[in-house]
Amino acid sequence: MEENITKQHTDSISVIIYSDNVAQKHEWKEKLNSFEKEEVTFTFNASGFSNLITGDIAILVAPEDNPATNTLIKTLNKNVTPYITIENFDSIESTVSNLKKAIKHGFTLKDFSQIYGLGIDISKIKSQLETFKKGISKIVLERPATIKDGIKPLSKKEAAEYASFFENKKDKLSFKKFVPASGAATRMFKFLNEFLLNFDPTEDTVNAYINKKKDEALKVFIIGADKFPFFNDAREESRKNPEYNNWTKDQRYYNFIKILLTDEKFNYANKPKGILPFHQYEGFTATPVYEHLKESVAYADSNGKSHVHFTISEEHLDGFLDSIQEVKETIEKESGTKIEFDFSYQHKETDTIAVDMNNKPFRESNGELLFRPGGHGALIENLNRLESDVVFIKNIDNVSHNNVDAIALYKKALAGILLELQEKVFGYLQKLEQDNSTKEEINNIVDFARNELFLNIPADIDKYTCEYKMQYLQELLNRPIRICGMVKNEGEPGGGPFWVKSKDGKLSLQIVESSQIDLNNSSQSEILSNATHFNPVDLVCGLKNYKGEYFDLKNFVDPDTGFIVVKNRMGHDVKSYELPGLWNGAMAGWITVFVEVPLDTFNPVKTVNDLLKPSHQPQ
């Protein structure tokens, strides 16, 4: 980045500090003017909100709801003067330091105003730009995690015992069900969108189209159309067309699909999955939101309450609120459990900068930098802000019409495993903190870490002193813990459990996506093909340490495991950096325990045709 991004064509920059606090604005003007001189000279002036002074950039020290601030902002916008707003003088010194960093790294004042408004740290952007240039190294697989080699087997009897252990502990703890739910259903209807684009109902037949395109998905959809929970509503809407009785069978198919995807009442391809009809019950259709609320009272309740946290896109808030309010009271009455819920959005400070194919920051037609959402790995920040002893994580589309009892049993079992392991880990950490562990006690902790936590401990650890081993074990064990359900691999696309070798040669258990692996490397490709299990995103997480304090989860992210993807922006190819995946690199530093769970606990809906599977149909 030492080569200019957009050269700042000046040797001096005039910064105007606006505030109605006369004493502080002049105090800070003098203090800032005495800052160590940089390559670019900064001069500071001060003013009240009613007195406009010409400058290169403005810092407004005032609450955002201050009417005088709003008036001044309108004037600055009219004069095209970049500005930032801070609430008080406490942050002015760090703000100016960040401004200097931005200029040093080649950003313009307008860029800085935009970046500051998003809350993104300049050093993160610099790191991302360097990542684009050097690329991201592929994950190095050592071997697949298998039963008794990284994956704990779990019989139904053992599951019931762990579930009972959990039940006995739960009312002393707080729980939250964390459901990533911001994804739109566009991919779910991808083959139907392609059909609408390519099919002419006046010139072609559906059968001819299916044969020509070899579109088996469309064939399955049409054969099973009357089994979808939205079938009757969409057909009734279609029948309202005055031409309905004159349509051929092919025209009716076409218009049925068109209504599903484009009619204002339906518009399924543009809505989030969470609020679409997934299941048909007697008298009503159920959304994934309904199913997750129903699940929450089945396994994530404590003291007569359950709590569900959805991460959503802000524009879909009303749709989620409506979906919840329609069913919440009914579920509460049936279960006797009160449901609490809340939402969070992907935080803007987790957005990442986009670059062109030459790794230079991409700019919109108005000259602004392009930032893109950082992917689901950004949700580690949402998770980091939750306050709960235990968090259950499950994707919005992984719900079932029929398997709730099995799902609840194994969710409780995973939570029971977490609580049992936490008790042992916390006890060992408290013992190690006392600094008086015997050699035998230390060896017992080492055995526990190897055999129950599947932590890779050097074979030569015995040659080190007890003091060193105690310190090593404290660092090894004092981390957040996640218990991850794993199902047998049946060819589903997605990640799986593996032993991974880090750059320093250490082994650890990780969930790895195929896109993170060098598939051109025959040995790595073979390890991938030998995987026995698949990641269904079925996690139970402990967020507190042995002192009852919350971990800062950002400290356990592996920044080298992000993704570079190519997107199209207004006809231009751009590269975007996606943060390490939530259950991949974002949790790389956690204690990870994989547990085998039955396939009937995993019921994802990736395409609309998945709704025809037995787990989504009435029995």
Image (spheres, rainbow, N blue to C red):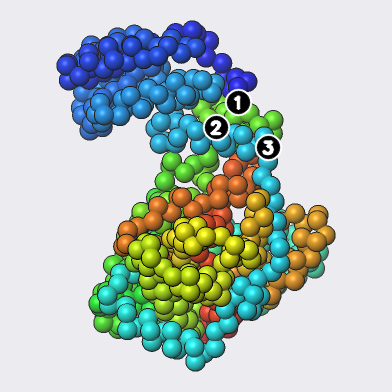
Q: Do the residues labelled 3 and 2 touch (CB within 8 Å)?
A: no
Determine crowd level at label 2: few under 14, some 14-19, many 20+ residues with C-alpha closer than 10 A: some
Contact flag, marks 2 and 1 (Cβ < 8 Å): yes
Q: Is residue 62 left or right of residue 533?
A: left
Residue receiving disc 2? 126
Mark 3 and mark 2: Cα distance apart in space: 13 Å
| Label at residue 1 | 1
Mark yes or no: residue 547 visible.
Answer: yes
- Say which quadrant the N terminus sits in: top right
Amino acid carrying label 2: it is: Lys
Q: Where is residue 390 in the image (x, y as percent from the top left)?
A: 37, 68
In three-dimensional space, the C-alpha distance between marks 3 and 1, rounded to whole angstroms, equals 12 Å
The front one of 572 and 435 is: 435
Regarding mark 1 in the picture, which secondary structure is present there? loop
Locate residue 385 relative to residue 11 in the image: left or right.
left
Residue 367 position in % (x across, y down) = 53, 24
**Between discs 3 and 1, the one toward the N terminus:** 1
Judge from the rendering whether residue 576 lies leftward or rightward of residue 393; answer left or right. right
Q: Specify which label sits upstream in the sequence, 2 or 1.
A: 1
Which quadrant of the figure has residue 60?
top left
Residue corresponding to mark 3: 134
Q: What residue is shown at x 40% (from left), y 14% (from top)?
A: 36
Q: Residue at x 63, y 63 (%)?
A: 460
User: Helix or strand or loop: what does disc 3 sit on?
Assistant: helix
